[in-house]
Amino acid sequence: QVQLVESGGGLVQAGGSLRLSCAASGSIFSITTMGWYRQAPGKQRDLVATITNVGRTNYVDSVKGRFTISRDDVKNTVYLQMNSLKPEDTAVYYCYAFAWPVARNWDDYWGQGTQVTVSS
């Protein structure tokens, strides 16, 4: 089994920065794509950014130039550096990984979510 634990959320003023971290633990053979999604109240969960095991990144247009995703494969950890935050970035941010755990098949895994609130 794979567990994803996020940290780094909180309250910040518009224009400020936050850094989210997500560590994957468990008996893991491999992880390919890791990423971040977010869900605002009353809305669906949407992609924010992803990064593959070869470093290919993808961002939703609304965060390009402000957010940076990175990963440390030794620590099985993915990061999201968020700069120039806007009130519309307020949401619960969920970590995601497509992983191959020992004695199981490849599957999608999600963290429990961390709240990011940007005040105007």
Image (spheres, rainbow, N blue to C red):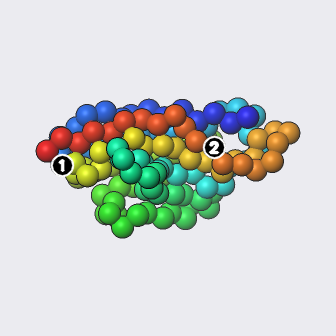
Q: Residue 73, how many percent across, how many down? A: 61, 46
In this view, which residue lies farthest toward the right?
Answer: 103
Q: Earlier in the sequence, mark 2 or mark 1?
A: 1
Q: Residue 79, how many percent across, how many down? A: 46, 45
Report whether 40 appears left or right of 6. left
In this view, which residue lies farthest toward the bottom?
Answer: 61
- Which residue sits at x=39%, y=55%? 68
Q: Is residue 79 visible?
A: yes
Rounded to the nearest angstrom, the CA distance separating label 2 from label 1 is 31 Å
Residue 109 tag number:
2
Amino acid carrying label 1: it is Gly
State the residue position of label 1: 15
In this view, which residue lies farthest toward the left?
Answer: 120
Query: Are the residues flagged by discs 2 and 1 in contact, CB closer than 8 Å?
Result: no
Identify the element where label 1 is drawn: loop
Front one among 46 and 98: 46
Q: Is residue 72 above or below residue 113?
A: below
Identify the element where label 2 is drawn: strand
Where on the picture, by quarter, is residue 52?
bottom right
Amino acid carrying label 2: it is Tyr
Mark in the foreground, 2 or 1: 2
Crowdedness of circle 1 by 10 Å Cα count: few (<14), some, many (20+)?
some
Crowdedness of circle 2 by 10 Å Cα count: few (<14), some, many (20+)?
some
Q: Is residue 72 visible?
A: no
- Which residue sits at x=66%, y=54%? 32
